[in-house]
Image (cartoon, coloured by chain):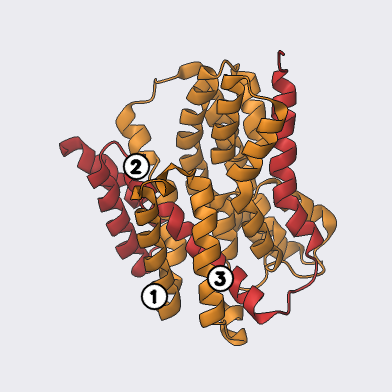
Chain colours: A red, B orange
Amino acid sequence: MKHNIYIYILVMFAVTYLIRVLPLTLIRKEIKNKTIRSFLYYVPYVTLAVMTFPAIMEATNSPVAGLAALIVGIILAWCGRSLFQVAVLSCVVVFVLELFL
Amino acid sequence: MDKQKNKYYYLKGIKNGMPICLGYLAVSFTLGITARNAGMTAWQAMLTSLACNASAGQYAGFTVIAAGGSYFEMILMELVANARYLLMSCSLSQKFSPETGLLHRMLVGYDVTDEIFGVAVSEPGKLNPFYNYGMMTVAIPGWSLGTFFGVIMGNILPANIVSALSVGLYGMFLAIIIPPARKSKVIAALVTISMVSSYIFSRLPVISNISSGIRTIILTVVIAGLAAVLFPVKEEYEHEA
């Protein structure tokens, strides 16, 4: 059976959109349960940390450059640098290091 | 009423959306190459990016298309690859003031990505939807145009530029999770535990074969769940964060 590319795209859109929009539209009230509140409060930190490492080492041509970007990024963020600065300087670290590696 | 405030958040969103846009250009460029390999035209690939705004979900979808899989297989694949957005949207729903209207919720829901979610939740207090609109204004063109050019230009961008740009998104994540970790020992410990577990999961036999989307979900539910039970958040602390 031959599949239509536009139906594929429609299916991808429908599933992706519903996953995102249902919680936003159905959960209208503030959740009172303390454990659930705490869980949802911790979710972003855990998710972002899990997605950052070790993926950052696999995103670059050289894993060492990725690791260096991670360390530099953590130090800069710890010192209170802005989102933009941390993002851009991490890129610079990789670019410069990979010239030599 | 709060036109002034909406404008402030919209402009702030555009500013903080710029690194997202740059990172997206690089990532979606490589996504475009995947789409071309799946036999898609630049227009079709760009349409997919405009409709989905989902990196892992689109990669997964393109593999289904390349293999000529069934529509049912596509549904399952998208559910799995995008399931983490369900958690993020649940979390984001608590950042909205209860009065936020349906239209705002539907528009914000159109572009809940790892990056936009990360920046939106790091904003103290309630979330103004215009902050998201600002980010979306620059992020969506970055994502879809990057995909478009990835299909038509293939490997024109030098590999070392792509390599450097691809780290920008992770730098952004760090800028979101590290400052709160400095203030809270619990968050600092959670970030460390999360990274270590994520590394172990990626190396263990069997578990490393599970898709990275699913691994992210499992680790998030387990680690954030345990933390919620062991260290329930105090109300006043929650408001500042």
Q: Using the rendered image of the protein, determine whether residue A82 is visible from the camera's viewpoint.
A: no
How dense is the environment of label 2, judged by Cα within 10 Å: few (below 14), some, or many (20 and up)? some
Badge 3 amino acid: Gly
Residue corresponding to mark 1:
B182
- The disc label shown at residue A58, or none: 2
Q: Earlier in the sequence, mark 1 or mark 3?
A: 1
Chain letter for the residue marked with disc 2 in the picture: A
**Residue found at the far front of this picture:** B206
Residue corresponding to mark 3:
B225
Q: Quadrant of the N terminus of chain B?
A: bottom right
How dense is the environment of label 1, judged by Cα within 10 Å: few (below 14), some, or many (20 and up)? some
- Quadrant of the image occupied by residue B58: top right
Residue B71 screen position, x and y as percent: 71, 28
Disc 3, SS: helix
Cα–Cα span, label 1 and label 3: 21 Å
Disc 2, SS: helix
